[in-house]
Amino acid sequence: MAGTTGLFIYWLHTGSIWPQGLYEKILGLLFYMVTLSGIIGVMFQRVFPKRLADTGSEVIYERIVDVIAAIREKNEAAILRCTDETGKDTLARHYVETLDWFFLQPRFSFNHLWGGRKGTSWIEHHFTVVRRYLNKTECDYLDELRNYALKKNQIDFHYAAQGILKFWLFVHIPLALAMLIFSLWHLLLVNVYAL
Amino acid sequence: MSIDQEPGHNPDRYERPLSSHVCGRNVFWQKTCWQGPEANGKCGGAVSCIPIEQNGGYKCTRPKGAGGSCSQGPLPDGSCAHIKPPCVPKPRARVLRRRLGLLVVIISLALIGALSNKSANISSSVNMLEPGDLSDIHTGFTQDKGCESCHLNHNDSLAGWIKTAFTKQELSSGCLKCHSFNEPEIGSHNFSFTSSSEQTECVSCHSEHKGKKSSLTDVSQATCSNCHKTKFDNFVEDHPDFPKKYPSEIPSSIYFDHSKHISEYFVEPNWQNKKNTDKKFSELASKNCTACHEIETASREVKPKPFAQICANCHQSQIRSREFIVMAAESFTPVSALLLGVVEDDEEEDESIEDYQQFLRALSDDSEEALLALAEELEIADSLPFLIKGLNPLLLKNAAEDWVKADEFMGNEEGEIERFGWLAGEDGDGDQTLRYRASGHADPVLRSWIELLLDDEQMALLQENVDSEIIERARDYLLDPREGPGACGKCHGPGLMDRIQLAEDVSPPTWLYRGQVERHFSKYAHGPHIKFLGPEQSCQSCHKLDISSDYTAYFKMENRNIDSFVSNFSAISKEKCAECHQPEKVREDCVMCHNYHFNPGHRETVQVREE
């Protein structure tokens, strides 16, 4: 709100939308970029925390690597048990050839940000397609893997949403710092040249 | 349910959020080690533990959270049996942000330092001290000294700049090198108000460096509101009422009764009874103001057309019919009494008669020499050639010769009269006189006599020799509206005689059109209004003829009081202007009708440069 009000104060102050001199143009550009990134940041802060809360789960951003690694370990343990128990490697091959890609790291980040369901669709497709080649015991293990996959998909959303909240600061703070430096110089120039 | 509590998560593990690095295995999405990076940013997980010496051997120290003591135990040399290749720890996002911020600060300062160049070493297009192009009008004035022409501290050091930033600048003094205004030049409105007067700066309202085509005189409503605290949202509701007689508070310099002309002189059948009238003109003038007023040059005032175009048809004959009696053979006239310094009551005295006879004798001997001697005595010798322009000295000499002998002068030839205007001999009343017949409008001889008698400086000199009553009598004779020679006073009386207080000055005598009260802080242009409404409609939409007003009353007064003057037209109210000047129609901001400056101009140095 304060940032948006600042925009009107800026226009009132300069008397125009776009200034004339190079220095003022840089300062004006920085101001607009800080304002724009600020507005986008506010939007992020309004949207993503709510959506994160709606998932019903919590995870610290820095621990996501370990949580995914732990899920991966559990998957691999389940596959080994399945192979030992059934003497068949159908599920193991499917995991190595297809599912492993998904469990390696967060996937579908942009789609998660836009609220898409690409991750869920991917899981449903790749778990359904192999089910017809499995016997009952293998299907039980497949269900176990599917639960882990859905959990991992949720973590992927946490990674994308928390990541964008952190990445936004990489844009807004440096721009604000640059604007502050240029504003101080502007203040000095104005007092020397105009007031 | 928290994902943190899922299998694989150890709630005892501390994430070290303040450490500067995270495990490098993060990059490959591998499981991070429990030790994490060391404080110096190096990998801390190359071994699972650091065994301790105990009972002559070594004991594994791997904590429970990381799996507890390993089955192999430490190697015989006391090192850990679980050796992993070290990772390359990565900086945390917080550290990266700090580094990026520092980089941006450095780049910003470097940019400012590199591109804020006071000399002309770098192009103005990339110079950060270049605040934008000057307006076209000011571009030439910075050619010699550059920025220092206006910004006196431009060449100071950075320390000087910082010091300057905390002291008040005298920017207006730079503007006043070229621009001049009424004193006080940096007082509000360049005027000494009795109520309050504040010091202002040029930059309070005018902004330079807005581009070559920018206008420095475009001032917003908000700028006026900086000082004028009275709320002003729109003209209709917030503007004060116009003066009671606006815009005709004072009589113009020419006596002209609009009502009389429009309702009588220009209307049939009256015009038919007059001589030298023009039916076509009368018909036009009775309906259309533009018959007499010059709309092509309309500005604040729409001045009347020249005498020859609009007045001469009816009034030219009046000028020629009223002769200027300079002197008579047997008595004093107002002018001869002035020249000889005789008051009206003394005219019949023997001494006065003797003086007059002596003057006639002098004229009969040498008229030129006699007049010159008299003019020198009265200190009007410089004006004499103009006062008697066209007078044949021989005519005066011959007439004087006859008058001294108490004979009648038989007069001059008619052709001579037509050519020079001077006559001597019997006049219409049967008296022997020397007289002058004006050639037409703006006759030079009559103008010279009237201007002589209205010249304060000349009159001050004359009054040393002549009683002021004599001067008054001569002046009254010359400017008498009914009988005065050339009928000058009939129309020019107000302009020549009325001394009206105009703002700070008193109006000087003038033959020319004077118009209305000077309004230094307001402006009006008839041109656009006439263009918009059309010449037939525009005048009467605002200037309503008021037949009932007594225009002549003021001029008949012996001691004229300006408050008693009424115009031929009804006053214009602000509601009339507001018919168009209102929101969604025509502009109604302050500077549309008001000027800020009083007597704006340029100093001589600029005028020379402009030339």
Image (spheres, coloured by chain):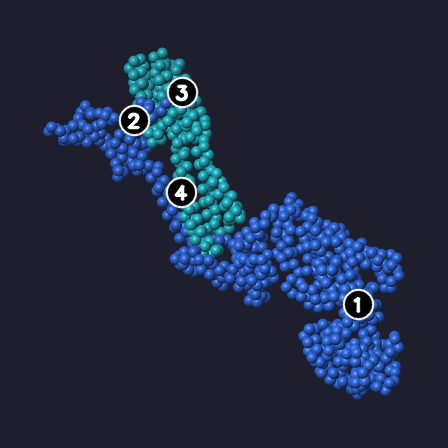
Quadrant, the N terminus of chain B: top left
Residue B357 is left or right of residue B11, and the answer is right
Q: Mark 2 points at which residue?
A: B11
In the image, B558 versus B299, the foreground residue is B558
**Residue A88's quadrant in the figure?**
top left
**Could you tell me which chain the residue with mark 4 belongs to?**
A
In the drawing, what numbered circle is on residue B519? none
Residue B430 place in picture, x, y as percent: 88, 77
Chain B representation colour = blue
- The location of residue A73, given as percent across then percent down, is 30, 23
Q: In the rendered image, which residue does mark 4 sit on?
A: A174
Is tag 3's residue or tag 4's residue first in the polypeptide sequence? 3
Horizontal arrangement in the rendering, residue B583 relative to residue B88 (left or right): right
State how far apart marks 1 and 4 are (Cα). 86 Å
Instruction: Kindly state the secondary structure of the residue where label 1 is placed.
Output: loop
Of tags 3 and 2, the one toward the viewer is: 2
Find the distance from the CA under tag 3 to the CA under tag 4.
43 Å
B65 or B397: nearer the eye? B397
